[in-house]
Image (tube, helix red, strand yellow):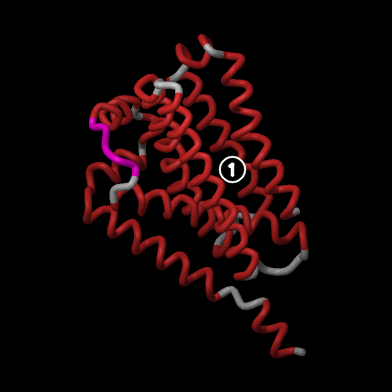
Amino acid sequence: MQALEKIANNTNWISLVLVLLLGMIAVLKTIDSEKLKGYVFAIFNKGFIEDEVEGDTSFFSPFYSLLFLFSALVLALVISLIAAPNKTGLPVSFSTFTVTFSIVFSYFVIKSLLEVALSSLFLIKKQLRFYIVSKFGYLYCISFVLLICFVVCQFGPLNVSGLLCITLFLFFIRFIFHVKNNKNLIFSELFYFILYLCAFEIAPLLTLFKLML
């Protein structure tokens, strides 16, 4: 029983995932260091997002695919750490992280595919280009900050409650900047924006936290 408990509570896998994330950053820097720097500060640099929109680069390129995977891993780590103490009082388990990552990754993939499909179906892909690029750009930006916060929480003085507050604050800032920089589109179609927000942003996240807490 003691051996099984020790294995169950082993958190060495977290260090391996962190090494993987650092390796991803190194690869991203090798592919395009300027673009990586741009996404790190994207939330404060509207001009960078505008350049990305004009560039019309495919989201399925190696750089964006790796950046997408990086963000999903970071969010899964943060959500797992926040949810684990409230659920079991034990350290984060690898199985919990695996399930969380699968849900987070699937959620973003499905939502992205639906957004692209619907925008193409209704012939509004060009109008929504900045909206979609900025939304993911700001997500990538806060993912870098959340990685630092996770490390400080896991190995430093920051507690889980502090991590939760920082995470909520960062997503609130992301929402404010997203609305501010897309205000013309949003307020001209406010009813549809509210429906989109409830269906694609709020409801899935509430379902996720309800399942995990």
Q: Residues within 10 Å of mark 1 (few under 14, many from 20)?
A: some
The segment highlighted magenta reads 55-59
x 53%, y 25%: residue: 176
From the viewer's perspective, is residue 87 above or below residue 203?
below
Q: Position of residue 156 (x, y in %)?
A: 56, 61
Residue 38, compared with residue 107, is above or below; it is above
Q: In the image, what residue occupies the spot 65% across and 41% down?
A: 204
Question: Which amino acid does the dot numbered 1 rest on?
Answer: Ile
Residue 125 percent coordinates (x, y): 38, 25
Of residues 77 and 135, the one nearer the viewer is 135
| Horizontal arrangement in the rendering, residue 104 relative to residue 55 (left or right) | right
Q: Is residue 80 above or below residue 206?
A: below
> Number of labelled discs?
1
SS majority, magenta: loop
Q: Residue at x 29, y 40 (%)?
A: 58
Q: Quadrant of the N terminus?
A: bottom right
Query: Does residue 133 belong to the magenta stretch?
Result: no
Decide: is 127 above or below 67.
Answer: above
Q: Which residue is mark 1?
A: 166
Q: Nearer the viewer, residue 66 or 84?
A: 66
Q: Position of residue 65 (x, y in %)?
A: 36, 51
Mark 1 secondary-structure assignment: helix
The residue lying furthest to the front in this view is 121
Residue situated in front as seen by the camera: 191 or 34: 191
At 34% from the left and 64% from the top, the residue drawn is 23
Position of residue 119 measured from the top left corner of the image (x, y, whole percent): 44, 27
Q: Is residue 19 left or right of residue 171?
A: left
When asked about the image quadrant of residue 170, the answer is: top right
